[in-house]
């Protein structure tokens, strides 16, 4: 498989959108599987992580959503938005949780508060107490997206589908700050219905860490699916990172992170999540099973973290040079967006900003895809600010 079969939406972009992660879901700790009250999911800790990422020059930050634990994503994003200076916010929404016209109004309002610095992560998991098939869940998400786009771009919503039947005027409050279609839609999913949904409607396809060969296969498949709809998508990677001055220090930090994780404890943590049995999670398990005795599946890609996580289950581990080289390899493949994280999130955010971020040319995806109204200042391509 070569890169010629990967057709990305923004081939002219030489840099990347480098993002961090806001731990709204009570998963921020110094040791996995050993919760410390200092890192609980509350306004103080999570807003500190987000504002630290903003100050250090990250271009976006994922605000995730979970039903089991954590804070409400849109409420948190709305509260923190006026405190930010430059960073975009990638707010996760669970399709079906909120009536689509009301959701569209909430997103448009938040987009105005942020003056166009809003992006959206589309989530299609089951609602608590329900058990829809994969095809049904993604069909519901498709309908939500179509209704949102009608509300954002038209004067009237006229929609009839399997889950929603809506005829409603679309007034000014439903119109987002960003023109040309509203906030960019980021999406992750691996099943055929998921890939089809992204190919038809979304802007950035988010992948979890796998070997470079497996990532290229995913990107090629998505490019072909998008082409069938006359579209292209950009590609993103959600991955953890542990960077230290020496490789020995980085590997020691990885081992330290897993101090309290035994096999049974790790299994309990992984199976706690609603998506624990998804196809994407099973692919993470496959990659972990391919790794060596130290948990590395390829150079600097460590899968040990997946022993205690459902979902994104691998980390880049190494020196600044090794991490930068690996990121540039991903960029050469066509990946344009990265969502990094580490434990504890504020500490690792500072280390990444010190050692790696200034060496990566960065941009803001909505700006570079012309979603900001004419006349707004364009954020230049640049490295991050140092501490």
Image: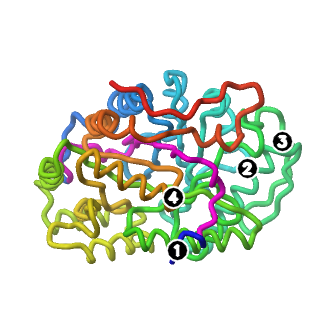
Magenta stretch encompasses residue 9:
yes
Q: CA distance from mark 2 to mark 1?
A: 36 Å
**Drawn side of residue 18 relative to residue 284, left or right:** right
Instruction: Provide the residue span drawn in magenta.
Output: 6-32
Q: Tell me the SS state at disc 1.
A: loop
Of the numbered discs 1 and 3, the one sitting upstream in the chain is: 1
Distance of label 1 from label 4 (alpha carbons): 20 Å
Question: Mark 2 highlights which residue?
Answer: 148
Between the C-alphas of marks 1 and 3, the distance is 45 Å
- Residue 242 x/y as whole percent: 25, 48
> Where is residue 205 drawn, in percent x and y?
56, 60
Circle 3 sits on which residue? 170
- Which of the two labelled residues, at mark 2 and mark 3, occupies the earlier sequence position? 2
Q: Residue 143 versus residue 235: which sits nearer the camera?
A: 235
State which quadrant residue 135 falls in. bottom right
**Foreground residue, 227 or 64?**
227
The residue that label 4 is drawn on is 206
- Colouring chosen for the image of the structure: rainbow
Question: Label 1: few (<14), some or many (≥20) within 10 Å?
Answer: few
Q: Earlier in the sequence, mark 2 or mark 1?
A: 1
């Amino acid at each position: 498989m070569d890169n010629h079969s990967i057709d990305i939406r923004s081939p002219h972009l030489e840099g990347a959108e480098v993002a961090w992660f806001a731990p709204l879901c009570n998963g921020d700790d110094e040791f996995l599987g050993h919760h410390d009250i200092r890192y609980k999911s509350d306004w103080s800790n999570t807003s500190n992580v987000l504002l630290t990422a903003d100050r250090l020059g990250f271009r976006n930050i994922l605000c995730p959503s979970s039903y089991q634990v954590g804070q409400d994503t849109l409420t948190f994003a709305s509260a923190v938005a006026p405190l930010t200076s430059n960073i975009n916010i990638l707010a996760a929404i669970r399709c079906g949780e909120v009536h689509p016209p009301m959701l569209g109004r909430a997103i448009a309002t938040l987009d105005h508060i942020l003056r166009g610095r809003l992006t959206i992560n589309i989530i299609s998991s089951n609602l608590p107490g329900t058990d829809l098939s994969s095809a049904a869940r993604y069909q519901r998400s498709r309908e939500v997206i179509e209704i949102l786009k009608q509300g954002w771009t038209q004067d009237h919503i006229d929609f009839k589908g399997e889950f929603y039947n809506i005829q409603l005027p679309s007034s000014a409050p439903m119109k987002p700050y960003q023109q040309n279609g509203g906030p960019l839609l980021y999406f992750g999913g691996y099943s055929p219905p998921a890939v089809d949904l992204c190919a038809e409607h979304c802007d950035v396809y988010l992948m979890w860490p796998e070997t470079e060969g497996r990532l290229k296969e995913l990107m090629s498949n998505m490019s072909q699916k998008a082409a069938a709809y006359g579209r292209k998508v950009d590609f993103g990677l959600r991955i953890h990172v542990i960077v230290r001055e020496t490789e020995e220090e980085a590997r020691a930090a990885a081992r330290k992170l897993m101090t309290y994780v035994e096999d049974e404890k790790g299994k309990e943590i992984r199976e706690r999540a609603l998506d624990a049995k998804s196809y994407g999670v099973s692919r993470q398990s496959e990659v972990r099973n391919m790794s060596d005795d130290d948990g590395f599946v390829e150079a600097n890609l460590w899968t040990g973290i997946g022993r205690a996580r459902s979902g994104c289950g691998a980390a880049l581990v190494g020196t600044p040079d090794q991490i930068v080289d690996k990121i540039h390899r991903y960029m050469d493949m066509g990946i344009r967006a990265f969502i990094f994280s580490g434990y504890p999130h504020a500490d690792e955010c500072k280390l990444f900003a010190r050692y790696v971020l200034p060496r990566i040319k960065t941009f803001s995806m909505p700006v570079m895809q012309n979603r900001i109204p004419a006349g707004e200042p364009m954020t230049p391509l640049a490295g991050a600010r140092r501490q």
